[in-house]
Every structure is written in structure tokens, then in C-alpha cells.
Amino acid sequence: MNATDTAPALLQVRDLKKHYHSPRRWLAPARPAVQAVDGVSFDVARGETLSLVGESGCGKTTTAKSVMRLIEPTSGSVKLDGEELLSLPPEQMRLRRRDVQIIFQDPYASLSPRQLAGEIVAEPLRNFGMNSAAERRERVRWLFEKVGLRPEAVDKYPHEFSGGQRQRLGIARALALNPKLIVCDEPVSALDVSVQAQVVNLLMDLQAEFGIAYLFVAHDLAVVRHISHRVAVMYLGHIVEIADRDTLFASPRHPYTEILLSAAPVPNPRTPAKRMLLQGDPPSPANPPSGCRFHTRCPLAQDICKTQAPALSARPGNTAVEHQVACHFR
């Protein structure tokens, strides 16, 4: 499954930017804007999982939250089912939030400690005036069963659940309104490895049953490889490579993707790891390098990389799924 099929994509993001401007101090020179996200474009098909990966600070979470307008983008276009979200007034955007939900990274901080678990999951239903109190309670008990929680746990507080159970609560809340797209902001990074597998498998089962699309933000490449249909690699606010999962892990083309994948642990300790180390320090998003943003650390960099930014474009030799790379030499 991929967003290059003939059917229009569920989510279409074009040239999305988010720049943070520091307040100017009296008599002090203006400071440059932090270019957290600078011209990101991608599609997410119905029922597809597109993962955003990259090192910390590359703009993954800012991109995901900008798509939902939890952070207001500086410019760009975000279309859901063909409707432009960035131009919607607040009340209309609120109604569209039924179709786009989020699972947060921290399964405890994202839950109100003063509400019962059932009240937390029922809150989206109350906010949108759906069903009577009895119907909401029945819906909540059904959601608890769907995410692997006991229905009688609706009367417990979040602190009475384990970390994995709290994240299941977050999944149930995101699922309550039957969304078309769920943004998963590193939903398993705070969990134990054994619990991570359970939650990831739960997300995949729910996707298969309800046809939900995921925009999945993650650091763990093993998790990304397990859950993704396609993967987009980000570096310093830009997407440098997009491909289907198997192609990207088997034959990455961008030098940064190669280095990123080489850093992943090897499951078999007897298999020698082929590490590729990044040279130099990461540039500041407030003062990014000219041309290709990766050229200051790239082993393939030449003079053209310092002056011309490569476009993210398809490369020859691709078959069913488009493999896009932003590199002059790949």
C-alpha cells in the first residue's frame, strides 16, 4: 500500500514550514528564525502507515503536530480528504478533529490524573455531543475490550494502570471518534521492549480492522520496520528520502539514511556490525548550511552540494513504489 496509487491520498502535505521567531530585544540585532520544518511534502494513503524517522531535533514531531494544527504552521498546505485544513476557521477545524486524532509519547502525562479511565476515553464523545450517557458508557466498555483492557477498569484512575495499559487508554481515546488518521508521536518509546511489541501489534490489528491511516513518528528503527508501509527520513527540517519499508531498509540511497540504518543494533551478536559514523556536529536549525543541509557531514559532498539544494525526486530503476531521494549523486 502506498500513496502513489490512483486513488487520491487521504492526507496531502505540501511545502510545510514551521519557523520559530525569537522576540527581538531592545537595541539588539534580530536573531535568525529557527527553521524547525522547512518545506516538507508527503502523502499518506488510506489505511497506510507512513513513518517519520531521523535523529533528535530533525523536526519529526513538529511536522506531525503542524499537520494537526496543534502547532500552527508558518506556511504550506495540509489537505485531508481534499479539504485544506490550514485555511479552516477554528470552529470548522474543531469539527475536522473528529477525523484526525493523536497518541502522545508519554502515556501518563497525557492522561488527567483527576479523571477516571472511563471518563478520559468518553471525553471525545462528550465534546462532540455523541450518544447518551448510557450509550457513551457502553461505547467506552467496547473500546476498552478492543485495546485489551478489562471493561471493569473504567472506574480506575490512571495511576492504577501500568505504563503499557496507560498507553492503551490513550489508544482507546484516539479511537473513540472513528478517525481516518491517527498521528502517533513516538507512542512506544516510553515503554518496556516486551510491552512495545504488544502495543505495536495492537495498532496494526486496529488498522487492519478499521482501515485507519497512521503518521508514525519514531526513533526505534526496529519498530519502524515492523509497522510501516513507507518511511520518510528527515534531516534538519527536510525530508531526504522516502521509500517503501522493504526498499529503504534493503537499499537506502541517501548517505544520511545509510548512516542512520548502520547505527541500529544488530540482533545477532556474532554478526559484525558495519558502523558508519557521522563527522562533525549537527548544524543549528537557526543557521542551516547553504545548499544541501547534509553536506557539512556527508562523505560524498562536493562543491555543488555547498551551493545547490538537491530536490526530493524519484530515481531511475524504481518499480511499483516511488523511491524519492534528495541527493546530487544518488
Image (spheres, rainbow, N blue to C red):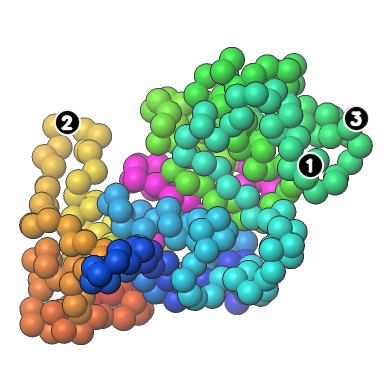
Could you say which is closer to the camera, residue 166 or residue 92?
92
- Residue 291: quarter of image: bottom left
Q: N-terminal of the two: label 2 or label 3?
A: 3
Give coordinates of residue 238: x percent, y percent: 33, 68
Give coordinates of residue 225: x percent, y percent: 39, 48
Q: N-terminal of the two: label 2 or label 1?
A: 1
Q: Which residue occupies 61% across, 37% down?
A: 171
Q: Which residue is mark 2?
A: 269
Q: N-terminal of the two: label 1 or label 3?
A: 1
- Hey, what amino acid is under mark 1? Leu
Q: CA distance from mark 1 to mark 3?
A: 12 Å
* Image quadrant in which the N terminus is located: bottom right
Which tag is nearer the camera, tag 2 or tag 3?
A: 3
- Judge whether 165 appears above or below 283 on screen: above
Q: Which residue is mark 1?
A: 125
- Judge whether 307 appears above or below 292 on screen: below
Q: Which residue is mark 3?
A: 134
Which tag is nearer the camera, tag 2 or tag 1?
A: 1
Could you say whether the residue bearing mark 2 is in a helix, strand or loop? loop
- Hey, what amino acid is under mark 3? Ala
Give coordinates of residue 243: x percent, y percent: 38, 65
- Judge whether 243 appears above or below 173 on screen: below
> Can residue 248 be seen here?
no
- Hey, what amino acid is under mark 2? Pro
278 to the left or right of 105: left
